[in-house]
C-alpha cells in the first residue's frame, strides 16, 4: 500500500467531516423497467442509482441516472472489473471502448470513462463482480456473498465523477467532502438487510425482494453499505445490527449497560443533554476494516469488538458525539476538529477510566501523546493545516492537562457551563479561552492557553 494513499485515507477517516446539510431528494418513483422509459422518467428526481444484488452468483446489476446540474465531472471512475453494458446521454449511445481507459493511482488500477458534454442526463448500466482484490486499500477484501457483502468507496462500486486531469488532482478530490444528490436503492433477497451509513432509509417489501431506499446525502467516500442476514435490535441507546452468528443477548448484555453507564457518567459530570439522534452500530466480519461516519453517528464495527467492554471506547465515543459537543460555524475552526473530536476523545477517556480503571486510563494518556506523524502546530491552526487528526490525540491531551491544572472537579463544572452556553451558539478558540479564564480566575491559565492554543510551545513536552 502506497504511503500517500494510505495517508489520504487515514486523513479521511479521522478528519473527514463537515456539518453536512442534508438535501432531501424529492419523492421519487423508481425506474421504470425498460431503458426507453427510464429516459423519460428521471424528471425532477435527481440522481438515482439502483443495485440489484444477486448474492448467490456474487454479482450486482446496477443502473444509474445522473442529471446535468446535479453532477460535475468530465469523467467518472469505476471499479476496473465492472462491465459497463450501456452508457447513454441525452438519448444517444456512447461506445464504451472509445471512452474507457485504465489509469493508475499509485499502483491501483481503475477504469476511467470520459464523458461528452451533455444537456440532460447520463444513464449508465453495469454489472459488478467484486473479487476481493480490487479495493484501493488493503483492508477492503470485498466480495458479494450471501453471508456478507460490504460495499465501500475504496472499491469504486459506484461512479465517482471528477474534473481531475492528473493523479495529484484525483487524490485531492478523494479527500474533498464532495456531495451530490443521490438516491440509492439496494434490492436484496428476503431475510437480508442492507445496513447503510445514511440516517433515513426506507424499507419496501416486494414479492421477490426487499428494497432499501435512502434519502438525504452523504459524500462519496462516506457511502458504505453492509448486506447480511442482520438481526436488528432497536434500543434506547442505539440501533444495533448484529451478524447472524452473533449471540445478541450476550452482546447486548455488554453494550447496553456500557452505553447507559456512559450516558449517566456524562450527564453527571458534563450536564444532561438532549441527544441529537441515535447511535447506529453495524457489525461486520473481522478483518474487513471498521469505519465511522460522524455525520450520521454510524459505526461499522468488526465482529468481536463488541464482545468485550475493553473495546467499547469506540462506541462510547460515537455516543458522546450525540450530546456533548459545542457548536462551530466557522469552517477553519470546524476543521480543527477541536470542539468535536478533542472534547469527545477526552470524554471517552473519562468514561473508560471510570468504567475500567487506572491501567486503561494510562493507555489513553499514552495514546494522546501520538503526533500521528504531523508537525505540532498551535491548536488553533489545526484547521488551517488540515491537521484535524491531531485533535484526537494532542487536542485531547490539552484538555487532560487543562483538567489537571484546574482540578478535575473544577474543570467538569466549567465545562458543563461551557457546553450549555455553546451547544447552540457557535464557539471559537478566543471565546473558549475567555470563558475558562473568566470562570476560574486561575492566574496560570492565560500562559497555558498561550503555550497550547496560540503557539506550539507545548511541543517540548510531547515525545
Ligand atoms: Zn469522533
Image: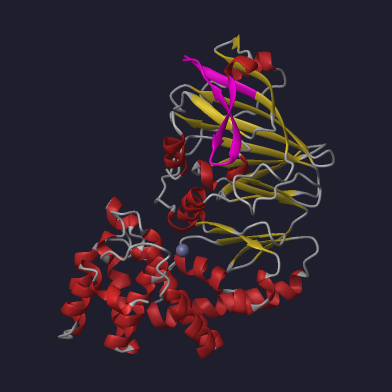
Residue 103, percent from left and from top:
56, 31
In the rendered image, the quadrant that contains the C terminus is bottom left
Residue 145, percent from left and from top:
79, 46
Residue 440's place in the image compared with 147, above or below, is below
Q: Residue at x 66, y 15 (%)?
A: 37
Residue 142, percent from left and from top:
70, 47
From the viewer's perspective, tell me whether residue 241 is left or right of residue 245. left
Q: Residue at x 74, y 75 (%)?
A: 250
Is-magenta flag for residue 24? Answer: no
Residue 167 visible within the image = yes
Residue 226's place in the image compared with 394, above or below, is above
From the viewer's perspective, tell me whether residue 320 is left or right of residue 443. right
Q: Residue at x 33, y 63 (%)?
A: 375
Marks counted in the figure total 0
Q: Residue at x 70, y 44 (%)?
A: 133
Report which quarter residue 356 is drawn in.
bottom right
Residue 217's place in the image compared with 121, above or below, is below
Query: Magenta residues?
Result: 100-124
Q: Residue furthest right?
A: 56
Residue 402, percent from left and from top:
29, 81
Classified by dominant secondary structure, the portion drawn in magenta counts as strand
From the viewer's perspective, tell me whether residue 272 is left or right of residue 45. left
Is-magenta flag for residue 111? Answer: yes
Amino acid at each position: 500500500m502506497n504511503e500517500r494513499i494510505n495517508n489520504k485515507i487515514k486523513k479521511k477517516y479521522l478528519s473527514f467531516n463537515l456539518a453536512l446539510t442534508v438535501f432531501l431528494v424529492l419523492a421519487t418513483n423508481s425506474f421504470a423497467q425498460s431503458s426507453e422509459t427510464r429516459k423519460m422518467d428521471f424528471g425532477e428526481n435527481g440522481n438515482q442509482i439502483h443495485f440489484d444484488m444477486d448474492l448467490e452468483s456474487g454479482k450486482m446489476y446496477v443502473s444509474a441516472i445522473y442529471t446535468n446540474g446535479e453532477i460535475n465531472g468530465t469523467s467518472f471512475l469505476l471499479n476496473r472489473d465492472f462491465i459497463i453494458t450501456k452508457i447513454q446521454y441525452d438519448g444517444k449511445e456512447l461506445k464504451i471502448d472509445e471512452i474507457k481507459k485504465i489509469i493508475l493511482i499509485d499502483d491501483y488500477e481503475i477504469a476511467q470513462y470520459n464523458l461528452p458534454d451533455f444537456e440532460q442526463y447520463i444513464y449508465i448500466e453495469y454489472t459488478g463482480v467484486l473479487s476481493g482484490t480490487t479495493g484501493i486499500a488493503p483492508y477492503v477484501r470485498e466480495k458479494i456473498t450471501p453471508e456478507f457483502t460490504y460495499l465501500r468507496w475504496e472499491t469504486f462500486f459506484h461512479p465517482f465523477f471528477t474534473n481531475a486531469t492528473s493523479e495529484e488532482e484525483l487524490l485531492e478530490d478523494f479527500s474533498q467532502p464532495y456531495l451530490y444528490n443521490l438516491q440509492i436503492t439496494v434490492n436484496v433477497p428476503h431475510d437480508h438487510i442492507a445496513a447503510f451509513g445514511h440516517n433515513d432509509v426506507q424499507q419496501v417489501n416486494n414479492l421477490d425482494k426487499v428494497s432499501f431506499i435512502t434519502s438525504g446525502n452523504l459524500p462519496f467516500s462516506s457511502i458504505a453499505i453492509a448486506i447480511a442476514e442482520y438481526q436488528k435490535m432497536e434500543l434506547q441507546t442505539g440501533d444495533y445490527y448484529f451478524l447472524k452468528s452473533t449471540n445478541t443477548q450476550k452482546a447486548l448484555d455488554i453494550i447496553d449497560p456500557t452505553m447507559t453507564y456512559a450516558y449517566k457518567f456524562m450527564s453527571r459530570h458534563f450536564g444532561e443533554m438532549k441527544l441529537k439522534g441515535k447511535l447506529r452500530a453495524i457489525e461486520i466480519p473481522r478483518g474487513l476494516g471498521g469505519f465511522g461516519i460522524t455525520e450520521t453517528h454510524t459505526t461499522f464495527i468488526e465482529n468481536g469488538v463488541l464482545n468485550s467492554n475493553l473495546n467499547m471506547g469506540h462506541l462510547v465515543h460515537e455516543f458522546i458525539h450525540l450530546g456533548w459537543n459545542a457548536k462551530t460555524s466557522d469552517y477553519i475552526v470546524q476543521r480543527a476538529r477541536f470542539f468535536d473530536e478533542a472534547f469527545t476523545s477526552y470524554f471517552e477517556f473519562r468514561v473508560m477510566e471510570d468504567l475500567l480503571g487506572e491501567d486503561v486510563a494510562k493507555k489513553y494518556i499514552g495514546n494522546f501523546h501520538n503526533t500521528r506523524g504531523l508537525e505540532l502546530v498551535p491548536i488553533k491552526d489545526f484547521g488551517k493545516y488540515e491537521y484535524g487528526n491531531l485533535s484526537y490525540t494532542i487536542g485531547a491531551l490539552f484538555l487532560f492537562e487543562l483538567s489537571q491544572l484546574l482540578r478535575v472537579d473544577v474543570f467538569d463544572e466549567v465545562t458543563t457551563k461551557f457546553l450549555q452556553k455553546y451547544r447552540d451558539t457557535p464557539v471559537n478558540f478566543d471565546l473558549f479561552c475567555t470563558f475558562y479564564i473568566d470562570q476560574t480566575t486561575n492566574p496560570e491559565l492565560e500562559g497555558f492557553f498561550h503555550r497550547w492554543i496560540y503557539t506550539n510551545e507545548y511541543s517540548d513536552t510531547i515525545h
